[in-house]
Image: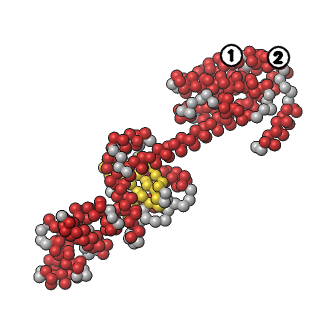
Amino acid sequence: MSPELDAAASKNRSSHQQPPSAQTLKRLQSHIGVLSTTALKYLDQQLPWYRSLEPNERAALGLIAQKGISTFVSWYEDPTSSPAWVVTDVFGAAPTELTRSISLQKALGLLRTIVDVVESQVPDIATEAEQGALREAVLRYSREVAFAAAEVYARAAETRGAWDSRLEAHVVDAVLHGEPHDSLASRIAAIGWKSQKNIRILVGTTPSSNSATFVATLRRVATRYSRDSLIGVLGDRSVLMLSDTNFEDVDLSRFTRFFGHGPLVYSPLAPAVKEMHHAAVAAVAGYAAARAWPQAPNPVSTDDLWPERAANGDELARTALIEQVYQPLQQASNGLLETLSSYLALGHSLEGTARELFVHANTVRYRLKRVTEVTGWDPLVPRDAFVLQSALLYGRLHEVNL
């Protein structure tokens, strides 16, 4: 309400309402102690959840009740004054932590109890002619306090949400930068992360729309498929960490539509928290290199991007190509490395490879099948052949530099 309308409304109320008599005000002030004592007794008798609170929490609520009653007496002397002070006067003594353990619904229940106490004492405080006005004042005051309570809880929720988001961002940053395990475990526990296994990390484009809406929506979807989740918005890219999920049964493409336009890259499964850093680094490197493969599926595994990551300077990808593809072929029998090299160099020609190696074409087929069994990549598939070609390239360079 604008100041002009509020002033007009106050003036209109004051013109229709007689001020309380000096006798009523005096009796009201003398009853503050009785009202406060009665209110605390009512709270203990009428609200079961109040009795279950910690002593310090009951004390804080009792202080709010007493402050509310004494403030009402001051307000009743001038009911047309601005209610803006209600938040400070009534709730100023309440610790912020109180909003965590006591819901707004319970706070309003406490308010109703106090109103009932004051109303029950009206006949002992005011004359019969003033009892109606006093009851009306109690109801008006309780309305202002109810709005004040809602404002306090809204502010607390907003502050808590902002603080939790900052903590979450710090944890994501700690994972990406490889913070020591003990420190990282402590940070994760502080934000309520309970799971310690089967962690998958996704990196995608931050949508151009409202980031708060994006984070809330992504978190809501993530809770369907994982026990815990962490979300970090890092400029134009966003990181989603999911844990304790059987990803064999989850279609990760469900997450694609929540990110912005561009690739969505997911990491290998990290078996525990201490391996999260390696999974996160791989996912970030995959996201940085994914645009070099325009035909890539979306989402795409960071392991499927080994060639692009290696070309982009990722040493982890080069090492993976060497240790998981090149060296196993080198150690295998039956000339698998030689056969694969000839097959790729001769334009994927089975007959040409057979002639160069002086073997039958069926022998070449058998050896290429063995390449698939040893490495997991099929040289007869164009994309897999590119991965194998990259492994040969980096494997040979590695041997030269030994």
Q: Is residue 306 above or below residue 74?
A: below
As drawn, the label of residue 33 is 1
The alpha-carbon separation of the residues under discs 2 and 1 comes to 17 Å
Where in the figure is residue 99, as x and y percent of width and height? Answer: 56, 34
Q: Which residue is mark 2?
A: 23
**Res 373 → quadrant:** bottom left
Residue type at mark 2?
A: Gln
Q: Nearer the viewer, residue 383 or 96?
A: 96
Graded by Cα atoms within 10 Å as few (under 14), some (14 to 19) or many (20 or more), the crowding at tag 2 reads: few
Query: Foreground: 27 or 128?
Result: 27
Image location (x, y in percent) of residue 262: 46, 65
Q: Amino acid at mark 1?
A: Gly
Q: Which is nearer the N-term, disc 2 or disc 1?
A: 2
Q: Secondary structure at mark 1?
A: helix
In the rendered image, is residue 278 in sight?
A: yes
**Residue positioned 31% across, 66% down in the render:** 310
Residue drawn at x 54%, y 41% is: 160
